Amino acid sequence: MVADALIATRINLNPRGAQPKMCDGWYIDGNREKHVQPMIFPSNHKLNGKPNSIKQILKERNIWPDNGIHLICEQYSGKHDDVDPERSDCCARQIMSLQPDFCEQKSILEEAIIEAKHIFERYLKFHCECNFIE
């Protein structure tokens, strides 16, 4: 991934500690309007220029739970494999990683290939007999 990629596991729950600056994200509000969301605090904020926290990002998107939430759920093993896939509110990182702008993040390889005006296609890692080259 590029250095400023939107990756939920790189963001802290609160605006402290080391975390990278990320490119601007976006979200669609209840009125179906698309809003660009800067991932750094604005110049009129006391933390100006510092990266936003997951809590701040989710509050701006109006999806932060009133009773709060943990950064990582208790069942988390690294990839949410053991968490019910239908559950989207187990922890802040899960909520953030399911946001459309984070889901659309491309790898550095994919971005380079598309920028060179080539076609980028993914195939199954296993069952190569399903690939067109077999």
Image (cartoon, rainbow, N blue to C red):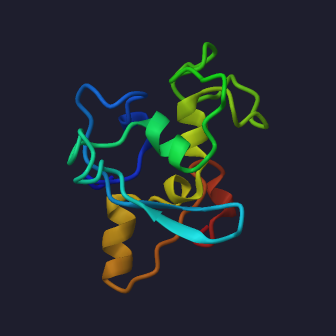
Q: Nearer the viewer, residue 73 or 16?
A: 16
| Residue at 22%, 46% in the rendered image | 48
Image position of 54 (left or right of 4): right
Q: Quadrant of the C terminus?
A: bottom right
Number of numbered labels in the structure image: 0
| Residue at 66%, 51% in the rendered image | 127
Residue 27 percent location from the top left of the image: 56, 60
Image position of 115 (left or right of 104): left
Image position of 71 (left or right of 14): right
Q: Decide: is 86 above or below 31.
A: above
Residue 69 percent location from the top left of the image: 60, 23
Residue 88 percent location from the top left of the image: 70, 37
Residue 117 percent location from the top left of the image: 37, 86
Q: Residue furthest front?
A: 44
Quarter of the image where one finds residue 132: bottom right
Q: Decide: is 44 above or below 59.
A: below
Q: Residue furthest top?
A: 74
Quarter of the image where one finds residue 16: top left
Image position of 78 (left or right of 1): right
Q: Decide: is 106 above or below 86.
A: below
Q: Nearer the viewer, residue 28 or 5?
A: 28
Quarter of the image where one finds residue 67: top right
Q: Residue furthest bottom?
A: 117
| Residue at 68%, 22% in the rendered image | 82
Q: Nearer the viewer, residue 26 or 80?
A: 26
| Residue at 54%, 63% in the rendered image | 122
